[in-house]
Image (cartoon, helix red, strand yellow):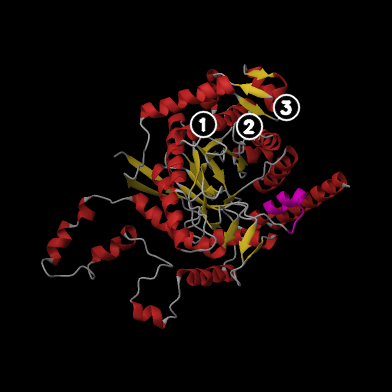
Amino acid sequence: MENIKLEVAPLAEKTREKVIKVEIRGGQLRILTSDELYQIHLATVEVLERTGVKVLEPKALRLLKEAGAYIVGKEKIARIPEYIVKEAIKRAPSSFTLFGRNPKYRLRFEDRRVHFSTQGMSVFVLDLETGKQRNSTLKDLENFHRLADALQYIHHSTQAVMPRDVPEDVAHVHQMLAGYKNTIKTTDGEIYGEAAALDTVRMASVVAGGEEELRKRPVLLGFHNPVSPLQLSEKLTAGLMVYAKYGQPVLVAPEAQAGATAPVTLAGVLAQQNAEVLSGIVVAELVNPGAPVFYGSVSTIMDMKTGNLAYGAVEAGLINVAAAQLAQYYGLPSRGTGGSTESKIPDVQAGLEKTLTLMMASLAGINFIYCAAGSLESTLTASYEQAVMDNEICGMVSRALRGIRISDETLATDVIDAVGPGGQFLTQKHTLEHLRKEHYITTLVNREKREKWETAGSKDLWKVARQEAKRILKEHQPEPLDRDVEEELKRIIKEVEKRESKRVG
């Protein structure tokens, strides 16, 4: 198979400022042929031209009409010709960089480079002391950013939970400050409405050193989820347009449910999802040609026994692999979902579903794998312990992606000859030189003999991960945010709180 590269983001340790590039061989999972990808494209064109997409944001609808789309009267449905889609794809960049608040920390999204993030916007947390579910708070959000900052294989720190102790209309600005204060890694923005998007642009401009610097060095990441089937919502589309204007990357990722909000067939999901993604990308490129966008997917099946979503289903993995191939077909960076589960606690079900979906998305070459760490219960609940466990899974997956290096040095025939029949390799210089390059060194997984494990307290992985999460939150201190920057961000928060108080009053 072809040689591909994996770029692992800088780590939250002494090597933080390095970008580690690893050459890997193979590991490219593909389930669709070139002809099948073209069939999906043709089906998508038919959906866009015949059925169309409902666009609830008036400015976006007007842009589509001016570009040549046919607007169906009061229904706000845009039927989008193929030539508009092709032009948008041509304008969208095939690669771009997202920066942390320290510009030395950056993620490059291109080719088949893989990056892992924590889960996003959970509304519950498993309490680290009691193990019981409770509402998430702003303190939890700060803690999850700090945890992600320390975890080696987590490259992007999302807004992991919704702070339910903060008023909803000002939560977005508090979330931004929590991210900037507690991690040097890249983090999210907020595009739920034009006002919120502009607020985050103001805050990000302070961090970046001005609006022009922000355009050159994006530090915001927006999440636009088309509403399946075939709708672009008003607020998210308005926010998408703001981020496109300022050159900040946006993920366009539908959450179609096979059998409920999309056809039950996975091919039908792909055709519909493709239409939803491409329509969002068209809007972004009409606002600002060259705006950075991800081809995304959050789609999965509805479990027909329960009526619930199944993010941990093998079918979700298949959809992610196909989404990666479609993104590569169009020459766009990709966003998928891996490491998801319907389990309510960190147990065997969680490990099974998480590893399966994460490995499939990674092997497919998804550039940005969302929810790779920390999520439970279809992302409704966040778990500190699970985030630590998932970091271990991400480390193992990263090792798998590197494959096996074949060279005279690694084939080691001279070493084999020197040791000879009946010898041992433990004391060989070759072993010391290559151990950490060849073997993934576990941090949580217990490989001791039973007797030693029992002497240490017979701790299961959940208990070990709880101890590690507590240790990190006690000991790890992120690189401090510049004091003047922090004060300016707090001033903006006060302005937004005053504005929203007047609006509500």
Q: Is residue 190 above or below residue 478?
A: above
Question: Do the numbered discs 2 and 3 sit on residues whose CB atoms are within 8 Å?
Answer: no
Residue visible at 35% across and 50% down in the picture: 402
Seen in the image, is 378 located left or right of residue 76?
Answer: left
Q: Is residue 259 above or below residue 396?
A: above
Q: Which residues are magenta?
A: 165-176
Residue located beneath label 3 in the image: 58
Residue visible at 29% across and 62% down in the picture: 433
Residue located beneath label 2 in the image: 231
Looking at the rendered structure, the secondary structure element under dot 3 is helix
Residue type at tag 1: Asn
Q: Is residue 308 above or below residue 58?
A: below
Q: Is label 2 or label 3 in front?
A: 2
Residue visible at 68% across and 63% down in the picture: 139
Residue type at tag 3: Pro
Q: Position of residue 372 (x, y in %)?
A: 50, 53
Q: Is the residue marked by circle 2 packed among few (<14), some (14-19), or many (20+) residues within 10 Å?
A: many
Residue located beneath label 1 in the image: 274
Q: Of all residues shown, which one is farthest toward the front?
A: 305
